[in-house]
Each structure stands twice: as C-alpha cells, then as structure tokens.
C-alpha cells in the first residue's frame, strides 16, 4: 500500500511537467504557414509575406487569381496556433 501511495504521489507531481503542451510562438506559426503555402500546388509559387501577432496571421503580397487568394487563406487557417487570418493579398494577373 505504501508503494502505491508513493507511486501515486510521484505521478501527480510529475504529470503537469509531462502534460504541458508547448506554446506556439508567432515565429513558429509564421514558419509553419510559409511551409504550408510553399507546399500547396495552387499557391506555392506566389510571393506571399506572412506575419503573425498573438496567433493572428496577416497575408500580404500578390497572387494571380481570386482562387489562389482564397486558397492561401484556407491553408493559413488550418495551421495549428492560428486564431485568425487577415487576407491582404492583391490579385494581379502579371
């Protein structure tokens, strides 16, 4: 019984240390959004600037079509840690 109590106490003390989820920083979010955008077949070749502040991601730059603009926003929203997306992409066919 004493061993059980010690083991239980030990697990209760250490559980918070192992259970902590790593908080994503804005830099980590920006990196992940850039990777996801670069890997996407529709928007991968576009020059898109990505910024983040407290999980709110801002997309700036030029894309060729409205479809690419919408897709870039969808891709960014799927990244873990993103709380919102401000899509300031401009459509420019050239």
Image: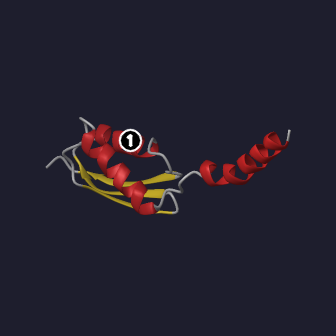
**Closer-to-camera residue (78/22):** 22
Q: Residue 87 location, x and y as percent?
A: 40, 53
The structure's colour scheme is: secondary structure
**Closer-to-camera residue (3/24):** 3
Residue at figure coordinates x 78%, y 44% from the top left:
8
Q: Residue furthest top?
A: 41
Quadrant hosting residue 2: top right
On the rendered image, what quadrant is the N terminus found in?
Answer: top right
Quadrant hosting residue 64: top left
Q: Residue furthest bottom?
A: 53
Residue at figure coordinates x 25%, y 36% from the top left:
42
Q: How many numbered dots are placed on residues in this image? A: 1
Residue under label 1: 75
Q: Residue furthest left?
A: 94
Q: Residue 44 location, x and y as percent?
A: 23, 43
Position of residue 88 relative to residue 35, above or below, is: below
Q: Residue 11 location, x and y as percent?
A: 71, 46
Residue 24 in view in this figure? yes
Q: Residue furthest right?
A: 1
Residue at figure coordinates x 75%, y 44% from the top left:
7
Q: Residue 38 location, x and y as percent?
A: 25, 45
Q: For the residue carrying disc 1, how many other residues have a C-alpha within 10 Å: few (<14), some (14-19), or many (20+)? A: some
Position of residue 63 relative to residue 25, above or below, is: above
Residue at figure coordinates x 73%, y 50% from the top left:
10
23 relative position to 90: left or right = right
**Closer-to-camera residue (21/52):** 21
**Closer-to-camera residue (37/20):** 20
SS for dot 1? helix
Residue 58 in view in this figure? no
């Amino acid at each position: 019984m004493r061993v059980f109590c010690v083991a239980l106490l030990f697990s209760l003390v250490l559980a918070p240390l192992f259970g902590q989820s790593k908080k994503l920083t804005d830099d980590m979010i920006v990196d992940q959004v850039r990777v996801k955008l670069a890997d996407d077949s529709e928007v991968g070749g576009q020059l898109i600037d990505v910024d983040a502040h407290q999980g709110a991601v801002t997309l700036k730059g030029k894309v060729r079509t409205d479809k690419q603009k919408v897709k870039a926003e969808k891709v960014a929203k799927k990244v873990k840690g993103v709380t919102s997306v401000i899509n300031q992409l401009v459509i420019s066919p050239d």
